[in-house]
Structure formats: C-alpha cells, structure tokens
Image: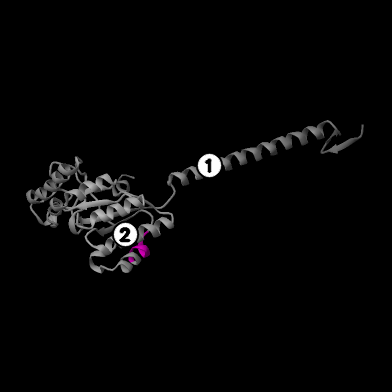
Amino acid sequence: MKRFRYRNGYFKRGSRVQTVALVSACLAGLTVCCLLYTARKIQSKKVDAAISGEEAPRVALTFDDGPSSYTMQLSQELKSRDVAATFFLLGENMEEHKEAVKQLVQDGHLLGNHSYHHVQLNKLSDKKACQEIVKTNNLIYEYTGIYPMYIRPPYGEWNDQLDCGVEMIPIFWSVDSLDWKLKNTDKITLRVLKEVEDGDIILMHDGYQTSVEAACRIVDALKEKGFRFVTADQMVVD
C-alpha cells in the first residue's frame, strides 16, 4: 500500500487519513448543529418576546383633573383600542361624576389621587395636606371599593416627609402635552409625538374635547409605531 509523508512519520491511505478526516468532519458538523440550535433558540425567544410585547417600547398615558363630562367618552375610546390609562382624580369633581369613576374601573384603568381641591400640597400644613389626600382616597374607595396607592401631586410638587398614615407613591411625568393650554387637537398630538420615547409617562387632562381627540390620535400613531401602553404603576414598579 502506498505511503504518504506526514511530518516526521508515515501513515497509510485509508487508515489515518480517513480517521483524521472523519473526526474533522464530525467536529465541523457538531459545531454547525450547535450554531443552528443556538440561533433557533435565540429566534424563538425573540418571537416569544414579540408576541408578549416584552421588547416593544412602552409608554404610559395619564390624565389629571377628572372626572369630567368627557371622561366616559375618553374611557370608552381607550377601551376600544385596548389601552389602559391612569386617571388621577380630583375629589371635588368626583361627586358630580360618580358613574364616570365606576366606569373607569370597569374599563380597566388605574385610578390615582390628585388631591381634593387641586392645591399645592407642600404649601399646606401637614394636617391640611393629609385631609386633601385622605378625603379623595376615601371617595375613590367608596365609589369603587379600591383604595388608591398612587398620587399625582398638583403642579408636581410633593413633600417626601408627609405622613398621612397611608402609603402614597407619587407619580410624575416626562412628557407634558400642555393640552390644557393648547386646546387644539393637532398641536397637542404633534407636541406629544415629537417628544415621546420608550419609558415616557405622558401628562394629559380629561376635561377637554380636544384632549380626548388628541389622546385617540396619539394612541393610534404610537401603536402603529409598535408602542405598548401600560398603566403608570408599571413604570414605577418595573
């Protein structure tokens, strides 16, 4: 049998050559299989994440100063778009719009406290500030059976040392729609869409028809871009 030179020794065709080739082929095949398996696992995780929405950019839509005569319309428009928002309620407005408060819960929205009289809480005595908070909390509980944990302090001013005997977690905002000032559907929509990014909390108000219209446009536009809407507590907890 013909021999082939291999470094300082010899080996036979059909013996060592084939063994080396076979081992190399097996290793190469094993490497390819591992790479394919890993790629499929990664792709599978991406598909699962896409289905669950884990990788989608998130945004929270929040409304202050309600409820109002527009709140039920807004709630139903959001529900029809499968969007849960957060409504920070004023105690003084709740008594006139009791059914709207109940409807918000039925439609899957999160309720929070916005004080009773829309006052700057850190300018009040602790006693009066607590009265503003507790009175509104009690109304929300009376109407819905849910005691709120979250507060949107009016004007974004909060006293971290305030102790009212109940835990209240303040939630602020990162995008201000200025809807109360603009009162123009196109301008409100454009302002928000120009600024909003993943992880933002959008501040709006549910006391204006233009705000309702703008909110619907904002939701439609952001959903088309792949955004996922969550309630504000999910931004704080996560």
The quadrant of the image that shows the N terminus is: top right
Of residues 6 and 20, the one nearer the viewer is 20
Magenta stretch encompasses residue 193: yes
Q: Residue at x 7, y 51 (%)?
A: 128
Q: Secondary structure at mark 2?
A: helix
Magenta range: 191-196
Q: Main secondary structure of the magenta part?
A: helix
Going from the N terminus, do you reach mark 1 or mark 2 first? 1
Which class describes the residues within 10 Å of circle 2: few (<14), some (14-19), or many (20+)? Answer: many
Viewer-nearest of labels 1 and 2? 2
Q: Position of residue 142 (x, y in %)?
A: 15, 42
- The vertical placement of 13 against 207, above or below, is above
Residue 199 in view here: yes
Q: Secondary structure at mark 1?
A: helix
The Cα–Cα distance between marks 1 and 2, rounded to whole angstroms, is: 35 Å
Tell me the colour scheme of the image. Answer: one colour
Three-letter residue code for mark 1: Ser
Residue 178 in view here: no
Q: Residue at x 62, y 38 (%)?
A: 34
Q: Is residue 192 left or right of residue 207?
A: right
Of residues 93 and 163, the one nearer the viewer is 93
Q: Which residue is mark 1?
A: 44
Q: Position of residue 174 (x, y in %)?
A: 30, 58
Magenta stretch encompasses residue 38: no
Q: Quadrant of residue 208?
A: bottom left
Which class describes the residues within 10 Å of circle 1: few (<14), some (14-19), or many (20+)? Answer: few
Q: Position of residue 224 (x, y in %)?
A: 43, 57
Q: Residue at x 57, y 41 (%)?
A: 40
Q: Which residue is mark 2?
A: 215
Three-letter residue code for mark 2: Ala
Q: Is residue 192 left or right of residue 157?
A: right
Number of the label disc, if any, that sits on residue 16: none
